[in-house]
Image: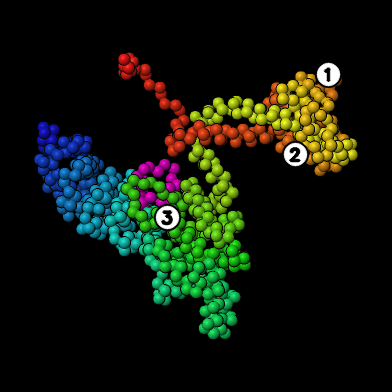
């Protein structure tokens, strides 16, 4: 109470230094809610209004403004006054609607003057920003007194804070305006190239964008995109001459050279039949009455606008799209109109057209500010992407929804990279082809299954020895069952069969010649044997002596991929093998390496290990489905002070 009383007296002082110090302290203490309430209860705001509206010691308004220009002390005092006022109003003890027209016009005058202290202008802009959404009357007053030209002038200064406050007031005016007013304001901003200015001087400035700036850019983007909402929610009127002409222009642009000359010679029925055929080639589902395809809203007339824009601004790409698909088989053609309608809906959903602005969102697309007709230009790029993806997927009419899902994913993933221009977006989205999408989906599926989480990777390493032992046992079991091999003579003629198998105790390799038609001879019928203890090494491919004889290139390559030899005994004899298949080669070379006490090295080992690890991990993690696995283990709690909490069964 005493501090509020002292400051109240201080701001009424005739001494400018005392008044300035009191106002500075008032601005600081006003952040405290208790102090603010006490100061307001003592009619402190009335004195602040007086300083702003009338000045002190009989200084008139115009004289005060001249002092403001010439005197830094007066500017400092006014800045502290406005700062204190803002802090007091933040507590909502007093309504903004209670401010007098004189006070508001004085604040407006600070904004509209050139030679005013920057801090005063910043605070004045903040005050007006708070006034705008309070009531329609205050909105109209501020909109009338502070012109868009003046705001744009403040936007183009080098002072970042002043720029920020000007942008905040502009956003407040846009949000409080009616749809018609908002459209007029956006048209005016477009004429002044405000988007290009923001793109060049704010987005590409050396300073990182602060949270407030990012939010304001998001709102500006959202407000601009929402101008499409009216067309998006309007169905096509089949009786509208203007809309019918737009629809007909699509057909005429695509097929003008084909149909213009003979059309005049056709009767009405023939002409109608020709038009229906051409609308079918354009990809309309209801070719006799294509307006029916545009009755669904959304996307409504916005889809028609996009198609017309594409046909007029990129006529070559439009004709190529339509004629290219007209020449394909019916089931393989990509329907332009149907794709355009669905793509427009997808873009509206991705860009949140028609949704109210979030109060906290900061997600904006830098490339939006580099292009006046952003939505239409984005459509032109994406409709060509649809045709490209359709061909990559070799799609038919039944795959239409699947193709558009892939296109949605391509667009969404590319937008998440925040490309700075539409050209960069075009390059990146075209590089993200169907095969890349499939790879990304596979990687994300692994992440989703938590198979790449740190604890899961550790679990994989723990499971590996056990599963490798399982693979070793399987390889030895396969050797015990044995395999039928063919002998190859010096002229590479396959002439004899022989069989080799491992004894059940894994100590001896039995082998011998067999007759055609014998698939699994008993071990007793195989006369030759090699003790495993006498085996010295395993040779593969080019290392084998029996592969070094002359032969044709292709045949030799096939033999090299399947050849292996066992070197045994002190005299280093060799038992030579040519596996019947690559699968048998992998199993036998792995099994022989196990017998020699070496690592299994075939590609089949890694494949089998991955399959077993995947299955085992899924079983182990079954109880953790939909539970996030942390990268680090949670801390172990301290042991309890005593163990007396156990139940006494006695």
- 74 vs 635: above or below: below
Colouring: rainbow
Q: Is residue 326 magenta?
A: no
Of labels 1 and 2, earlier in sequence is 1
Q: Which callout, 2 or 3, points at the residue further toward the start of the chain?
A: 3
**Mark found first going from the N terminus, 1 or 3:** 3
Height in image: 556 above or below 642?
below
Which residue is at a point 50% across and 68% down the rendered structure image?
285
- Per the image, label 3 sits on a secondary structure element best described as helix
For the residues labelled 2 and 3, the Cα–Cα distance comes to 54 Å
Name above or below for residue 565 compared with residue 69: above
Residue at mark 1: 570
Residues shaded magenta: 198-220
Q: Foreground mark, 1 or 3? A: 1
Asked whether the beta carbons under mark 1 and mark 2 sit within 8 Å of each other, the answer is no
Give residue 351's position: percent from left, percent from top: 42, 54
Residue at the spot of label 2:
581
The residue sitting at 60% across, 57% down in the picture is: 394
Say whether residue 318 is visible: yes
User: Relative to residue 292, is residue 436 depicted above or below?
Assistant: above
Label pair 2/3, CB-CB below 8 angstroms: no
Closer to the camera in the image, 553 or 477: 477
Per the rendering, the mark at residue 349 is: 3
Rendered residue at 63%/26% (across/down): 469
Residue 339, given in percent of the width and then of the height, sits at 51, 62
Q: How many marks?
A: 3
């Amino acid at each position: 109470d005493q501090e509020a009383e002292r400051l109240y007296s201080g701001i009424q002082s005739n001494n400018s230094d005392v008044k300035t110090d009191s106002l500075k302290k008032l601005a600081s203490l006003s952040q405290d809610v208790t102090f603010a309430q006490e100061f307001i209860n003592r009619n402190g705001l009335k004195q602040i209004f007086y300083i702003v509206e009338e000045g002190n010691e009989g200084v008139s308004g115009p004289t005060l403004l001249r002092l403001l220009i010439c005197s830094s002390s007066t500017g400092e005092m006014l800045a502290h006054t406005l700062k204190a006022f803002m802090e007091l109003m933040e507590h909502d003890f007093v309504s903004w609607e209670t401010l007098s027209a004189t006070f508001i016009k004085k604040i407006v005058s600070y904004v509209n003057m050139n030679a005013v202290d920057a801090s005063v202008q910043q605070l004045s802009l903040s005050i007006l920003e708070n006034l705008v959404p309070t009531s329609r009357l205050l909105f109209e007053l501020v909109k009338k007194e502070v012109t868009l030209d003046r705001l744009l002038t403040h936007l183009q200064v080098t002072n970042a804070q002043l720029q920020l406050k000007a942008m905040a007031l502009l956003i407040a005016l846009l949000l409080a305006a009616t749809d018609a007013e908002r459209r007029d304001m956006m048209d005016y901003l477009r004429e002044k190239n405000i988007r290009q200015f923001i793109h060049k001087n704010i987005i590409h400035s050396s300073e990182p964008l602060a949270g407030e700036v990012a939010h304001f850019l998001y709102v500006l983007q959202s407000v601009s995109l929402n101008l499409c909402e009216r067309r998006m929610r309007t169905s096509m009127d089949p009786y509208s001459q203007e809309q019918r002409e737009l629809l007909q222009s699509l057909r005429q642009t695509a097929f003008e050279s084909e149909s213009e000359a003979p059309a005049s010679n056709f009767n009405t029925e023939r002409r109608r039949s020709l038009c229906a055929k051409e609308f079918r080639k354009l990809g309309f589902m209801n070719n006799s009455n294509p307006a029916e395809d545009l009755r669904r809203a959304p996307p409504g007339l916005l889809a028609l606008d996009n198609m017309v824009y594409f046909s007029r601004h990129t006529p070559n790409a439009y004709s190529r799209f339509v004629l290219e698909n007209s020449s394909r088989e019916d089931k393989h053609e990509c329907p332009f109109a149907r794709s355009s309608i669905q793509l427009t809906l997808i873009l509206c959903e991705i860009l949140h057209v028609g949704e109210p602005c979030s109060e906290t969102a900061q997600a904006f697309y830098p490339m939006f500010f580099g292009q006046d007709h952003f939505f239409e230009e984005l459509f032109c790029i994406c409709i060509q992407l649809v045709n490209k993806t359709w061909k990559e997927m070799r799609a038919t009419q039944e795959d239409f929804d699947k193709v558009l899902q892939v296109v949605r994913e391509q667009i969404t993933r590319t937008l998440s990279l925040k490309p700075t221009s539409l050209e960069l977006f075009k390059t990146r989205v075209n590089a993200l082809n169907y095969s890349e999408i499939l790879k990304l989906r596979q990687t994300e599926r692994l992440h989703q299954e938590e198979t790449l989480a740190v604890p899961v990777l550790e679990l994989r390493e723990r499971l590996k020895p056990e599963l490798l032992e399982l693979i070793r046992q399987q390889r030895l079991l396969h050797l015990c069952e044995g395999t039928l091999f063919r002998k190859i003579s010096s002229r590479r003629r396959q002439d004899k069969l022989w069989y080799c198998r491992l004894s059940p105790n894994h100590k001896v390799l039995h082998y011998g010649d067999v007759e055609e038609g014998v698939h699994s001879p008993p071990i007793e019928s195989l006369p030759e044997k090699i003790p495993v203890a006498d085996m010295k090494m395993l040779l593969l491919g080019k290392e084998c002596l029996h592969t070094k004889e002359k032969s044709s290139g292709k045949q030799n390559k096939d033999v090299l991929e399947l050849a292996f030899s066992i070197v045994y005994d002190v005299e280093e004899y060799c038992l030579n093998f040519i596996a019947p298949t690559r699968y048998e080669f992998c199993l036998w070379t792995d099994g022989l390496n196990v017998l020699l006490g070496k690592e299994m090295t075939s590609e089949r080992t890694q494949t089998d290990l991955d399959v077993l690890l995947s299955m085992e991990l899924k079983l182990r993690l079954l109880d953790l489905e939909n539970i996030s696995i942390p990268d680090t283990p949670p801390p172990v709690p301290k042991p309890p002070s005593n163990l007396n909490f156990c139940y006494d069964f006695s």
